[in-house]
Amino acid sequence: MSITVEFFGLARKRAGVASIEIDAHTIGTAFDVLESLLPKWADACLDDGHLKRSFLANVNSRTFVNDRNQPLQDGDHLLILAADVGG
Amino acid sequence: MSDTPHGYHGRYLHVDLSTQRSVVRELPADVLQQHIGGSGLGTWLLQQHTPHEIDPLTPDSPLLFVFSPLIGSPLTTSAKFAVMAKSPLTQRINDSLSSSHFAIAGKKTGHDAIVITGHADSPACLIIEPESVRFESADDVWGLSSQQAANQIRIRLGKQFHIASIGPAGEHLVRYATISNDGRHAGRGGLGAVMGSKNLKAVAVTGDRLTTYAHSDELIAYSKDLSRKSFGPATAKYRELGTVSNLLTFNRLGTLPTRNFQQSEFAEAERLAPETMSVTHDRTRASCAACTIGCEHIFHVSPGDKGVRMEYENLFALGPLCGISHPDTVLCASALCDELGLDTISAGGTIAFAMECAERGLIDAPDLRFGNGDALLQTLHLLAHREGLGDLLAEGSRLASQQIGQGSEDFAPHVKGLELPGYEPRTLQTMALGFAVGTRGADHNRSGAYQVDFSDKVDRLLATPGDVTLAIETENEAALMDSLILCKFLRGVFDDRLAAMAEMLHLVTGWDIDVAELQETATRIVNAKKDYNIRQGWTPDEDTLPKRFLTQAIPNGESAGAALTEETLKRQIEAYNLARGWTPDGYIFDHESAS
């Protein structure tokens, strides 16, 4: 199923793109796909298949997720953003 | 004093501007251990020196500069100090922190805090050195910006002095005037007006008094490791983009306050984003004193100008909140706030409120419309000098709305008089609780509850009483960080923040303090702030949000329909009060023992 991954802040800078469409049915498979497509992003943002502590994942601007097994639906938007939003 | 703990001088200076006399008073070791420094120690000192229900703009109201045991140590980001007083904006406790060489020089005067009371007969500069306290006329710098005044005073006194000074807004008692130092600001709550009410233009400090450290070698090693970590990925966001990178994130999540909180998205946010402005504008970077993070991003309107430091808060408040999308206007407005000595959040919040009043026909200000950048810039000048409509807006949105009436109180964007920062509370409902119960009003630095909303621990659009303990944890953590005093941008660096704070305190002071004891200290500090407010007239009905947030859902955009009811917020507040060990409506059971 097709989802859109949107990058914000430092995640966007590391990805080099604002968004990308990929096929993925869970958060985990999304990260695996991104790792192969955007290795520089993965180097900066992933650690052993999980987001590093300084990044967050959010689905459809509503739910923050931290579980690789979290299912995704066709048309979902996966947002990757910095964990510390203060300032 | 043989029992003075390492890291401290064990004394504070009390200056009376009316008599031009000063006295040095002892700070008992147990008081220091129980309140640490900064915000905690300052709260204790305010309790000792503030008469009940005093007008903060009268001579007997104390103004405090408070240092910490970590200042002067090699620990990164430790060059910070707290300025404290009863706020003229909120009539409640106020602590504003700032980072600069003023912190280091102030502590080197040989005091852990400086308490200032009284009123100078004419504009004055207070000069403090280890063996002397003296006064000079500030007639020649009265009316100047804080930076201009500081430069002139420094030329006169010598480069060894570091200066905290007010601008025209402080002189005109604008209730959200700042105190500036080395280009940084103690921003929130109007402490510049307290200083102005004392006819005090500037405080100049220098000295050579050093404190000792309990475990010097280990402290140096720890500091090196912390500096190394602080330069790592946990702080890369601050270093590479700055807090302004929140703008697009918040906009996408539908939590960016726009047009006086009438919307939570700004269609033109992209124009103001750092990703765009870094292409369209020159940008340089800088660091606070003794800081290895380097989060300051300075944008330039034209090549070669001195530039203006941009943070998310001044970007949101002078941009989307006022409907302004032109980057140069926001940059100029931010620079103007720095020059005039205005808190950007309260200035933007109050002007946005006035723009809505004008558009609704509640005040006669034809040009004051959302999106009108010229009107924004002109209004900043007017309010800093209390001219025309500016005299009303210099009072802040709460008092202005009380004078305007006609229902405007419902959308004046404040809690306890302090204008809300850039977090839409209907879409961040743990933060909504933090705003409502905050002792200094709506604030994102004394409660970090937004961290909870930006996590998988809660549903940020659906508050539940179970969330309150998470909000309390962030409040306690902030109380400790503001007392040590350390930059909150370090938070991501630590695996266990409380354990790290306990370790730093141990290395500096020698105290064998564990995490549980530190938690007790945090609770003591939070309780002391609440106790102060109760003594200054706090009532439970202050702990709420403006009616707009409790009666209107977000009308459109990503967060369309997000709502927070009065009943839900009250339930949260009661749960919070009980979790704090207070009465359900928020009084401290053992009110006397909190002081």
Image: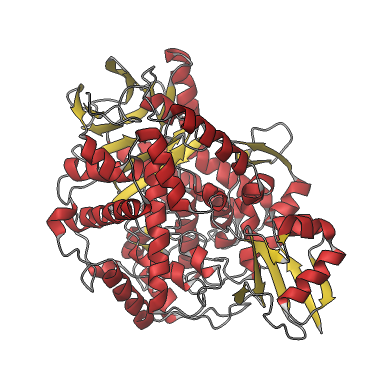
Q: Quadrant of residue B577?
A: bottom left
Furthest-right residue in this view: A37
Q: In the image, is residue A73 above or below residue B532? A: below
Q: Residue at x 29, y 54 (%)?
A: B520
- The x, y position of residue B52, in whole percent, is 15, 50
Left or right, B427 with reference to B108: right
Left or right, B533 with reference to A24: left
Q: Quadrant of residue B556?
A: bottom right
Q: In the depicted view, which residue is nearer to us: B50 or B332?
A: B50
Q: In the depicted view, which residue is nearer to us: B66 or B345?
A: B66
Q: In the image, is residue B9 above or below residue A9? A: above
Q: Residue at x 62, y 74 (%)?
A: A65
Q: How is the image coloured?
A: secondary structure
- The x, y position of residue B518, in whole percent, is 34, 51
Please state the total of marks drawn on the protein image: 0
- The x, y position of residue B319, in whole percent, is 59, 57
Q: In the depicted view, which residue is nearer to us: B198 or B355?
A: B198
Q: Residue at x 63, y 57 (%)?
A: A54
**For the N terminus of chain A, which image quadrant?**
bottom right
Q: Quadrant of residue B256?
A: bottom right
Left or right, B285 with reference to B75: right
Left or right, B562 with reference to A8: left
Whether residue B244 appears in this view of the structure is yes
- The x, y position of residue B504, in whole percent, is 43, 40
Whether residue B412 appears in this view of the structure is no
